[in-house]
Amino acid sequence: MTPAISPARLMRRLTALGEIGALEGGGVCRLALGDADKAGRDWLVAEMERLGLAVFVDAIGNIWGLRAGRGQGAPVMVGSHIDTVATGGLYDGALGVLAGLELIETLNENGIDTEAPVAVAAFTNEEGARFAPDMMGSGVYCGALGRDEMLAVTATDGAGVVGAELDRIGYRGSAAPVVPAAYLELHIEQGPVLEREGLRIGAVTGVQGIHWTEFTVHGQTNHAGTTPMALRRDAGQVAMRIAREADAIAAAFGPPQVATVGVFELSPGLVNVVPETARLTVDLRNTDGNRLNEATRRLTGFAETAAAQAGCTLSTRPLARFAPVGFDAALVGKVEAAARARQMSVRRMPSGAGHDAQMFAPLCPTAMIFVPSEKGLSHNVKEHSDEADCAAGAQMLLDLVCDLAGARI
Ligand code: GLV
Ligand code: MN
Ligand code: MN
């Protein structure tokens, strides 16, 4: 049996990282490559060095700490992210990275060595909240996204460019990514299923496809009182029709299709002025790649027609296009078996959220472990997972790493 991780130590680290970028009243804001992200990275690197890991940073700012093995082979990698959305909680991403530190500390204090090296990684901009697309760092690491193209991405609010921000915070490195022997990610579920079914562990079978699209509608400002309805070029009304259509598509397609309008901005944004410009983003997801493509085609076609009907022009920008991903069947089986070996209740389930793990799936055997999210809340300052659940997930991560990396116990 592998040794027990320390739940108290894991929670101490979650609390410590949660204080960096903490929001008044709870929650955390560590938007990618901002000052709080830099402070979180500095804290993480110091923790890695304290645990004796060799720390690497690559050209897109991914950080990984390596614990040497007896052999020189590819490492078994665990990881996730420490950036958050602007209204984030303490667990999304952080749990996976900090459980990685916890498992290293448990190996160290028990004097356990492994045949394969073990790496703990934190990937840049998993959230995509400040720079699109999401999973940017892991996408570049795994070769699914172009490094130079990503370094040139401008922030969604126009304030900052990835490469310049990496330079500013001192995290543009030069380490060459290594293809791991296997990749494992512990994460909170971010949904209600495990809690509702009273289960402790989710063995994640894959991640649904994600399409993000930004629509910008250009019309004409005019007087809200004097301009007859038929003579307006109202960008706001077009944007509202696009938003309604996203909802209608989700209803027509049915589950698992989901649609979210997360950004909706009107300009000049004045009570008595017909809006000249409207910008909105639509996040469409489905486990079926063909259905997802169809949903995106239908929405973009609708948007073009709606803009033309209103005498407006439209620009459409794809911000993210990720196909659904299936994880390694054998490794998913190992996750399930590892839970059962610890008498933890477990079920197989797909992930609704995007994760760094999906980028690794084409490269090496990859799987994820989910633990319950209280009330299914995430991307919310009230996001919470119980200590016992976080600890159970971290223990499983250690058990699996010991197995995959050939621990001498
Ligand atoms: C990442 O958190 C996503 O699923 O949007
Ligand atoms: Mn996450
Ligand atoms: Mn997230």
Image: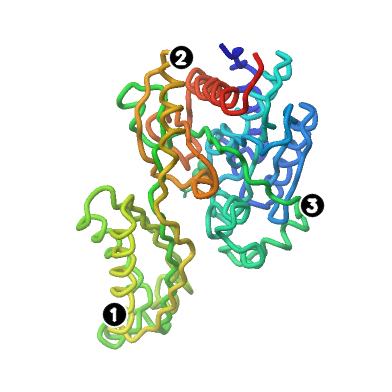
Return the x and y of residue 166 as percentages of the image width and height: 73, 56
Q: Residue at x 46, y 33 (%)?
A: 331
- Is 29 or 101 nearer to us in this picture? 101
Q: Is residue 325 left or right of residue 400?
A: left
Query: Looking at the image, is 256 positioned above or below residue 320?
Result: above
2 vs 1, front mark: 2
Return the x and y of residue 7 as percentages of the image width and height: 59, 17
Q: Which residue is mark 3?
A: 170
Return the x and y of residue 250 as percentages of the image width and height: 26, 56
Q: Residue at x 30, y 25 (%)?
A: 197
Amino acid carrying label 3: it is Gly
3 vs 2, front mark: 2
**Dot 3: what SS?**
loop
The reply to whether the residue tagged 3 has its Cβ within 8 angstroms of ligand 2 is no
**Dot 1: what SS?**
helix
Labels 1 and 3 touching (C-beta < 8 A): no
Q: Which residue is mark 2?
A: 342
Mark 2 and mark 1: span between their CA atoms? 57 Å
Mark 1 and mark 3: span between their CA atoms? 46 Å
The tag earlier along the polypeptide, 1 or 3, is 3
**Dot 2: what SS?**
loop
Occupied quadrant, residue 161: bottom right
Q: Quadrant of the N terminus?
A: top right
Which of the numbered marks, if any, corresponds to residue 305? Answer: 1
Occupied quadrant, residue 202: top left
Q: Residue at x 47, y 42 (%)?
A: 379
Amino acid carrying label 2: it is Arg
Q: Residues within 10 Å of mark 2 (few under 14, many from 20)?
A: few
The tag earlier along the polypeptide, 2 or 1, is 1
Query: Looking at the image, is 55 positioned above or below residue 236?
Result: above
